[in-house]
Each structure stands twice: as structure tokens, then as C-alpha cells.
Image: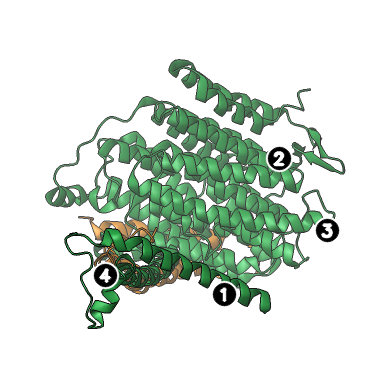
């Protein structure tokens, strides 16, 4: 069989091809590459297939296949196909190439079996995603992209340092680090935490994602963070400390989304919130925990992809990205609104949609591990998801009565351009995926590493979620008048490097510049004063009040005659100072 | 605007139905209070919803929300430009 066919490499080659192919052929390859990738993933068999000797003693395992990697491979490939369909008509060749290479590098991290190939593709992923962000070609995007790159280079370097430690200890293959707690453990954890948006290293996501191009955001929502949680599951499963980070992420992300006004920033915070569930489940570990984390990641790529696609469609159609400037779009954009409704209910965990299926596993992991407080907090985070996406965005952007009139009175009529067909197709495929997994959960459970069954459709599970949501909806309706988002900017931990650190660095550099400038002007003044006397030594006597006989009478500029003498004195002085310095150095 | 009365009635009907189903058919797998007491999830949903609304809209919004041009305003940069003629090359 075709076991040597590396799905990640197919995508990377697709990306390189897109740099050289002509426009029409490029659009075909852009879809064909990911389609081939899907096939390649489905053909994979467990084992290690592409072993390349790097240097003697170190073998690169480029394609190490286990059940967890296959599960991530399947959804990464499907995600890249959907995202390619969505982005096929937009972007120039560089953007499209960066997108494909980015997806391929992410896939290659997942299939990497040793530390060196992992860090190699990890860094390619960071660079490619940075290229996607800056291909928006706006000033904001290039600034946000720069910050994104800095944060990810920091994470990458931490990871690299940890990996170097690991390799010097003689461990080349990727292995679970839970319970080791040495320097390598912490360094790798910090590196991975940047990608998995574990606070306080999470704020790059809401900073950078909203500035990327529409198609690019759909790619980015699927990979960087998911590779992060893949590494959390693979390297840190069962690390109990991470449980509370996960719970904080789930609650914090949902709360930030409640006050956020920019659509894509809101969804970025929901990535943080959803990753919270995944990190918490991975931290509990065990078969159910790992399966729950993996299954939730799988579903997250599906519904988060649809949410970002719908959001991109809304922004493309209206040219507006703030909730406070949108309203009542369901009438003109019924398909987008429908897909969004499905995906937003899926992310909330509504029965018959995919989020419910994997949340059941996550909740079972909490309950079976005896983490009941965490369980309650995750339930409340589900309520937060309902309030901030399923109710807030659906009401204020798509379905709310009277919202449109109010907005148009303030900002002028909302002009709606038609949404391209390929975007609609991609959205519908994604939304169908959410629905199919939701009604046939065994498809998903069969893919998980340990094939745990979440038993989602029992009366207690279903009634539990519907009760939670119905009661929270009452709270939402009670507070509806004050629920509309304000046109404000919400600060996050990126404030630390955008304000105080920036001023510290600027202040330091301004201070150094000032010091240098004042030294320089002091020297200039001294030299300037000295120059006068050197050019015309007789001026010393004049300034001292002595009588100087005018020997050079008749020559207007007697500097010309006096200068050689002055310069001789100056040269002698310099030589004397130099000799003194050398003498002091030699003597001490 | 939204017809609240209608929404409340629909929600109340859904909640009542769910509690009835829970009482009749649910066999909880776990034994915490929210698994065993029918309708306890309603309390979590309602209280949790309000807790989040207050946390986000009252506490976090008050601390974290600034004007939209917050990061573009640079009060320090201008005074620096004035204070040294040759400066400016130094800061990034």
C-alpha cells in the first residue's frame, strides 16, 4: 500500500506548486492537493514509515502513525479541503501557497515521531501562518503579524531549548513527559502553551486572527491551536496541574466573548474557551480524558471552521466587522444565517449536533475522575458559550427584530454584496459535518484512540443540557437591553507588551539616545572651542588680553598661516594622549 | 423588539417538559446533586448565566474596556520628538 505517502508533504508540495503554476491551474491544484491528502490519510496504517537518517545515531521519523495522529490527520485533511474550497477564489499566489504549506506543516508536526522533525515543522508552521496574516496587506495586519511572530518565536525557542535538553539526555523520539517535572518539561510546556493559548500566553490569538484575510483565518482557526492541544494530549496527558488552566480558559474565553464587539475577536476568544475543555480533559487523562480531548478537537475544527467561514462571508458581504454595526442579516443571507445557527448550537453543545457528542466525553472524564468542581465550572462555561455566540451573535447579527433599523439609523444602510458560491459550498459542507457527527456519534467514537463511548443520547444527558440552556436563555432575555456590545476595545495580556514593555524599551532607547546626544554635543562644543585656538594659536594670547603685534598685517585671513602650527600642536597632543594611555595600560 | 412574554412561556414549557422527562426516564450515571435532583441543572444554568453576565459585563468590561484607538494613541512619543532633535532614530 501507499504507506510512504506523507499527507503533510502532499500539502507542502501543493503549496510550493501554487507559487509557480498559472492562475487557472493553481485553483485546480488548490482543491486537488487537499483532496489527495484526505485520501492519503485514509490509507495510512499504524507504524513508522518514513525513517531518514539525519546524522549517525539520530534518525528522523517523519511519518509515525498511531491512532491519535490518524484522528488529527483526518480532521486536518478534511479541514484543509473545506478551507481550500472556501478560499479558492480569493488571495494571491503567495497567500494560497502560505496557507497550503501552513496546513502541511501542521500535519507534519502531528505525524512527526521525533523531536527534531517536530520542531522543524513547528517553526515552518509559525512562519507560514505569519505570512498568511501579513498577506492582508494592511498596516494593522503587519503590526499584529509582527507581534504574532515575536510571540511564536518565543514559544518556538522555549520548545527548542526543551528539545535540546531532551536530546542531550539521549531521548530522540517524542514521548509523554507527564510526571518528569524537569527543566525540559517546563520549557516544552511553555512552548506548547503558547500554541494551545494557555493563559497568560493566549492573547496573540485575539490580536492576530482578526487581521488575517478571510480565507486565511479559516485555515488559522484549524491548525496552530489544534497542533498545540495535540502536543498537550500527546506530551502532557494526565498532568493534573493543567486542569485548572483548562477551566480558567473555558470561563475566561466565554466571558471575554460576552463583551467583545469585533466578530473575529469574539470567535478567537471562543477558541480559547473551547481549548479549555480540551486541555482540561487532557489534564484528567486516562482513556476517556484523552478520547474526550481528541474528539472535542475534531469537532472544534468542524464548527469553528463554519463559524469563521460565516463570519468571513458576513464581512465580505457587508464590509463591516463589528457586531454593533450589523443586524438582521438573516433575511438577505439565509444560508449563511442557517449555517451559522447550526455551528453556533454545535459549539454550545446542543443535542443532535457534534459539540454535544464530544462534550459528553469530556464531562464523563471529569465525573469519573472525581473533579466535580471542574465539572460545574465547565457546565457554566457551556452556558457562557450559549450566551455569547448562540444567543448574542445570532440575535444581534442575524435574527434580532428591530436591531437592523436601530443600527441603520446610526451608521447608514447596510449594503450587502452577494456571497460567492464556493464560500457557500464550503459552509454547507462544514455544517453538514457538524450535523452528521452529531446524529451518528459512533463515527467519531470509532476514530478516537481508545474508542470510548460517551453514551450521549441518554435521558439524563439530553435533559441536563436543555435545562441548562433554557434557564440561561431566561437570564439572557432578562438582560437583553444591556446585552448589545459597545464600541470599545477590550484589553488582554497583550497589553503587557503593547504598552509597558513598549514604553520601557522605547524609554530605554530614548534614554540611551539622549545620553549619547548630550555627550556628542559636549564633545562638539569642546572641539569647536578648541578648534578656534588650534586654527589660530595667537588668539590664545589675544583672549588673555596680551598685546599681539600684527606681524601678518595685510593678510585678511591669517588663519591660513597659523593653521599648520596649530595642527602640529594638536597632532602632538593626540600622540601624547595615545602614548599616555598605552603606558597606563602597559603599566597596570 | 422581542416579545418577552411569549419567549418566557415557550422556555417555561421546555423546562417543564425536560423536568418531567428527567423524573420519568433519566437514570443518572453519576451521583452528584445535579445528576440526581431533577431540575437542578435549571438552577446552574440560571445562576451561572447571571454570574457570567455580571462577571463579564460589570466587572471585566469596567476594568478591561478602553477607547478603540487606545493602542494608537502615544502620548509619550510626541514629547520625545520635541525634547531631542536628533532622537527618534533610536526608537523602534
Task: Mark 2 or mark 3: name the one nearer the start of the chain.
Answer: 2
Foreground disc of the pair 4, 2: 4
Front-lying residue, B58 or B36: B58
Residues at circles 1 and 3 in contact by the CB criterion of under 8 Å: no
Q: Residues within 10 Å of mark 2 (few under 14, many from 20)?
A: many
Vertical comparison of A103 with A88: above or below:
below
Rendered shade, chain A: green
- Residue A560: image location, x then y, percent: 28, 58
Label 1, secondary structure: give it: helix
Residue B69 visible somewhere in the drawing: no
Secondary structure state at the residue bearing disc 4: helix
Q: CA distance from mark 1 to mark 4?
A: 38 Å
The residue at the point 37 percent across, 43 percent down is A311
Measured from the top left, where is residue A579 in percent x and y? 57, 71
Task: Report the residue marked by disc 1.
Answer: A580
Q: Which quadrant holds residue A45?
A: top right
- Is residue A246 in view? yes
What residue lies at 62% left-to-right and 74% top-to-bottom?
A583
Chain letter for the orange part: B
Residue at numbered disc 3: A169
Query: In terms of depth relative to the viewer, which is nearer, A41 or B66?
Result: B66
Q: Is residue A373 left or right of residue A147?
A: right
Amino acid at each position: 500500500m501507499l504507506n510512504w505517502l506523507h499527507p503533510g508533504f502532499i500539502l507542502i508540495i501543493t503549496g510550493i506548486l501554487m507559487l509557480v503554476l498559472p492562475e487557472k491551474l493553481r485553483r485546480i491544484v488548490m482543491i486537488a492537493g487537499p483532496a489527495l491528502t484526505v485520501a492519503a490519510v485514509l490509507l495510512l496504517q499504524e507504524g513508522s514509515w518514513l525513517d531518514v537518517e539525519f546524522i549517525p545515531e539520530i534518525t528522523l521519523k517523519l511519518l509515525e502513525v498511531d491512532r491519535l495522529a490518524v484522528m488529527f490527520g483526518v480532521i486536518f485533511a478534511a479541514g484543509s479541503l473545506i478551507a481550500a474550497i472556501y478560499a479558492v477564489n480569493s488571495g494571491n499566489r503567495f497567500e494560497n501557497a502560505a496557507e497550503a504549506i501552513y496546513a502541511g506543516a501542521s500535519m507534519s508536526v502531528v505525524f512527526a515521531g521525533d523531536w527534531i522533525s517536530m520542531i522543524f515543522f513547528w517553526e515552518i508552521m509559525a512562519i507560514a501562518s505569519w505570512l498568511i496574516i501579513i498577506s492582508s496587506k494592511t498596516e494593522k495586519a503587519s503590526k499584529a503579524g509582527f507581534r504574532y511572530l515575536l510571540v511564536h518565536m518565543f514559544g518556538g525557542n522555549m520548545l527548542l531549548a526543551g528539545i535540546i535538553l531532551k536530546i542531550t539526555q539521549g531521548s530522540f523520539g517524542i514521548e509523554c513527559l507527564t510526571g518528569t517535572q524537569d527543566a525540559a518539561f517546563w520549557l516544552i510546556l511553555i512552548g506548547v502553551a503558547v500554541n494551545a493559548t494557555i493563559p497568560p500566553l493566549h492573547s496573540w490569538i485575539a490580536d492576530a486572527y482578526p487581521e488575517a484575510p478571510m480565507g486565511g483565518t479559516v485555515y488559522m482557526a484549524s491548525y496552530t491551536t489544534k497542533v498545540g492541544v495535540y502536543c498537550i494530549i500527546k506530551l502532557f496527558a494526565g498532568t493534573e496541574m493543567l486542569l485548572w488552566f483548562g477551566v480558567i480558559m473555558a470561563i475566561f474565553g466565554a466571558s471575554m466573548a460576552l463583551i467583545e464587539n469585533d466578530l473575529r475577536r469574539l470567535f478567537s476568544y471562543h477558541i480559547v474557551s473551547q481549548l479549555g475543555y480540551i486541555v482540561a480533559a487532557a489534564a484528567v487523562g486516562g482513556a476517556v480524558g484523552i478520547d474526550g480531548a481528541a474528539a472535542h478537537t475534531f469537532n472544534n475544527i468542524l464548527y469553528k471552521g463554519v463559524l469563521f467561514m460565516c463570519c468571513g462571508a458576513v464581512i465580505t458581504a457587508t464590509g463591516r466587522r463589528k457586531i454593533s454595526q450589523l443586524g438582521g442579516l438573516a433575511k438577505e443571507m439565509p444560508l449563511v444565517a442557517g449555517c451559522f445557527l447550526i455551528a453556533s448550537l454545535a459549539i454550545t453543545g446542543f443535542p443532535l449536533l457534534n459539540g454535544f457528542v464530544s462534550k459528553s466525553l469530556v464531562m464523563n472524564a471529569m465525573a469519573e475522575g472525581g473533579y466535580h468542581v471542574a465539572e460545574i465550572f465547565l457546565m457554566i462555561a457551556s452556558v457562557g458559550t450559549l450566551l455569547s455566540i448562540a444567543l448574542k451573535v445570532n440575535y444581534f447579527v442575524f435574527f434580532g427584530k428591530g436591531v437592523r433599523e436601530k443600527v441603520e439609523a446610526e451608521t447608514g444602510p447596510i449594503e450587502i454584496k452577494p456571497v460567492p458560491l464556493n464560500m457557500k459550498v464550503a459552509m454547507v459542507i462544514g455544517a453538514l459535518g457538524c450535523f452528521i457527527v452529531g446524529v451518528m456519534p459512533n463515527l467519531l467514537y470509532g476514530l478516537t484512540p481508545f474508542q470510548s463511548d460517551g453514551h450521549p443520547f441518554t435521558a439524563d444527558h439530553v435533559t441536563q443540557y436543555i435545562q441548562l440552556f433554557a434557564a440561561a436563555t431566561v437570564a439572557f432575555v432578562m438582560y437583553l437591553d444591556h446585552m448589545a456590545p459597545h464600541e470599545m476595545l477590550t484589553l488582554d495580556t497583550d497589553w503587557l507588551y503593547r504598552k509597558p514593555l513598549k514604553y520601557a524599551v522605547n524609554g530605554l532607547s530614548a534614554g540611551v539616545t539622549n545620553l549619547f546626544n548630550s555627550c556628542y554635543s559636549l564633545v562638539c562644543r569642546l572641539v569647536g572651542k578648541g578648534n578656534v585656538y588650534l586654527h589660530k594659536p595667537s588668539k590664545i594670547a589675544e583672549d588673555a588680553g596680551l598685546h599681539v603685534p600684527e606681524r601678518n598685517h595685510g593678510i585678511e585671513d591669517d588663519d591660513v598661516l597659523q593653521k599648520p602650527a596649530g595642527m602640529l600642536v594638536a597632532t602632538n597632543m593626540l600622540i601624547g594622549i595615545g602614548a599616555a594611555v598605552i603606558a597606563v595600560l602597559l603599566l597596570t | 423588539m422581542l416579545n418577552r412574554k411569549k419567549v418566557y412561556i415557550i422556555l417555561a414549557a421546555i423546562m417543564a417538559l425536560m423536568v418531567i422527562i428527567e423524573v420519568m426516564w433519566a437514570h443518572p450515571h453519576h451521583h452528584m446533586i445535579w445528576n440526581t435532583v431533577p431540575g437542578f441543572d435549571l438552577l446552574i444554568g440560571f445562576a451561572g448565566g447571571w454570574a457570567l453576565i455580571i462577571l463579564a459585563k460589570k466587572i471585566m468590561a469596567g476594568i478591561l474596556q478602553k477607547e478603540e484607538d487606545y493602542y494608537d494613541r502615544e502620548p509619550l512619543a510626541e514629547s520625545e520628538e520635541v525634547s531631542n532633535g536628533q532622537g527618534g532614530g533610536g526608537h523602534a
